[in-house]
Image (cartoon, rainbow, N blue to C red):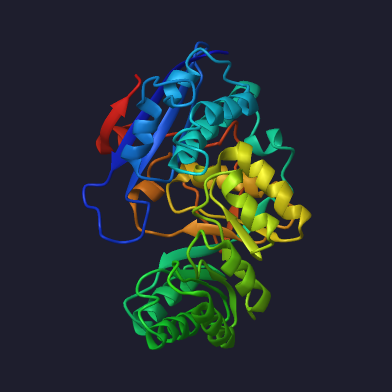
């Protein structure tokens, strides 16, 4: 089964807000073969940058666009193709957005493989250990504690038994930070509460916040520090009264390796649209062997939701699933299947490949750029 086309499409909503939410645009990679099958994947990064990495012509043997690398290759050889892409993008890749672009390809190739064999991806990865997950409603903080209270309350009343609140305006001041978490706890009631700081503090400030937030019984404190500050994460994790989570911004195994080697986190958050199935399988094995926990990161479309469910279902100690509840058409309408928690739980798809199908009319309405057709 040979690859004949690598199509890259950028979708964008008509109105894009200035907020930290990657569900306002999308970049899709569609890998087509000489047998008529197509696999679909996506990356969570700047869509135009990903498209440039896919479209780039040959420059030299270790600086080459992904389409040039893939055309004519055997579509089912996912491990070999990952290594080939890694080698031939060495001069502009390794732990960057190039790995995210490769992850979109890898997701599409695994979708193809599942369709070719008539099997869900979780079975090809070795078999699922979970049929469904307790899902947490993932949403941004309100402007203050009062608005945050109302946001948390809304999603508990919608049936969620866990809520994560994050990013702006956390980091403004100690008073603002405590007001946000206090409001979140009051709104969430007895539900699990998770806090995503959004990379805003130095290590000592983060430790003070962790101690203060412990009074509100939070499940974890996510990304309190710069994503690259591995030593400070290790220092904080050893001292914090609450679990420390991070990893959503890491692209591939090489980016995760220092965090794992240093045992810097309690919860490693893996985004399939930045790691692909191939590297996510490696990360899973490494994290499980050091006795830490795994969770998905996902704030994009149903494609990554499906990919995350397949992968996380194979993780032995998986215990929560990130369920983006942004009111975005890209989050809810890109595929015919709606992948969202019901009564606080989300189920793993069992159809071939990813188990979801694109709504092509939705794609046409939101398409702003395309290449490789």
Decide which of 183, 265 is in the foreground and name it.
265
- Residue at 49 percent across and 81 percent down: it is 205
Whether residue 18 sits left or right of residue 104 in the image: it is left
Q: Position of residue 340 (x, y in %)?
A: 50, 53
* Image quarter hosting the N terminus: top right
Does residue 169 lie above or below 340 as drawn? below
For the point 63% across and 24% down, the residue is 80
Q: Is residue 303 visible?
A: yes
The residue under the point 51% across, 66% down is: 223
Q: Is residue 266 left or right of residue 165?
A: right
Above or below, 98 against 319 in this view is: above
**Residue 266 pos. (x, y %):** 66, 66
The answer to whether residue 350 of the structure is visible from this angle is no
> Of 54 and 4, which appears nearest the observer?
54
Residue that extends furthest to the left in the rendered view of this protein: 14
The front one of 231 and 317 is: 231
- Total numbered labels placed on residues in the image: 0
Q: Could you say which is closer to the camera, residue 345 or residue 89? A: 89
Image quarter hosting the C terminus:
top left
- Tell me what residue is drawn at x 39 percent, y 74 percent: 151
How far across and down, in percent of the image, does residue 180 sit?
41, 81
Coordinates of residue 228 in the picture (x, y in percent): 51, 59
């Amino acid at each position: 089964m040979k690859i004949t086309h690598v199509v890259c499409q950028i979708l964008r909503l008509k109105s894009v807000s200035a907020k930290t939410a990657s569900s306002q645009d999308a970049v899709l990679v569609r890998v087509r073969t000489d047998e008529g099958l197509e696999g679909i994947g996506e990356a969570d990064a700047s869509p135009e940058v990903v498209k440039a990495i896919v479209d780039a012509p040959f420059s030299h043997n270790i600086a080459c666009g992904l389409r040039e690398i893939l055309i004519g290759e055997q579509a089912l050889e996912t491990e070999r193709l990952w290594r080939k892409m890694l080698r031939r993008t060495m001069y502009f890749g390794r732990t960057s957005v190039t790995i995210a672009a490769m992850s979109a390809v890898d997701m599409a190739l695994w979708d193809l493989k599942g369709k070719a064999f008539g099997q869900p991806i979780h079975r090809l990865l070795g078999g699922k250990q979970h049929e469904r997950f307790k899902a947490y409603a993932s949403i941004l903080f309100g402007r203050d504690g009062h608005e945050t209270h109302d946001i948390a309350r809304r999603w508990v009343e919608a049936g969620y038994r866990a809520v994560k609140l994050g990013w702006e305006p956390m980091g403004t001041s100690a008073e603002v930070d405590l007001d946000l978490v206090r409001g979140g706890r009051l709104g969430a009631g007895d539900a699990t509460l998770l806090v995503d700081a959004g990379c805003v503090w130095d290590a000592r400030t983060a430790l003070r916040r962790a101690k203060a937030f412990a009074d509100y019984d939070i499940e974890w404190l996510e990304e309190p520090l710069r994503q690259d500050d591995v030593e400070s994460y290790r220092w904080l994790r050893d001292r914090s009264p609450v679990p420390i989570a991070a990893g959503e911004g890491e692209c591939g195994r090489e980016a995760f390796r220092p965090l794992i080697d240093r045992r810097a986190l309690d919860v490693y958050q893996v985004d399939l649209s930045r790691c692909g199935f191939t590297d996510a399988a490696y990360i899973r094995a490494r994290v499980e062997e050091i006795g830490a926990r795994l969770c998905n990161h996902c704030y994009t479309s149903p494609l990554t939701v499906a990919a995350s469910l397949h992968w996380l279902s194979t993780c032995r100690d998986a215990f929560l699933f990130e369920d983006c509840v942004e009111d975005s058409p890209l989050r809810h309408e890109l595929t015919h299947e709606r992948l969202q928690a019901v009564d606080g739980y989300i189920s793993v798809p069992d159809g071939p490949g990813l188990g979801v199908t694109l709504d092509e009319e939705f794609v046409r309405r939101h398409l702003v750029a395309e290449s490789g057709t």
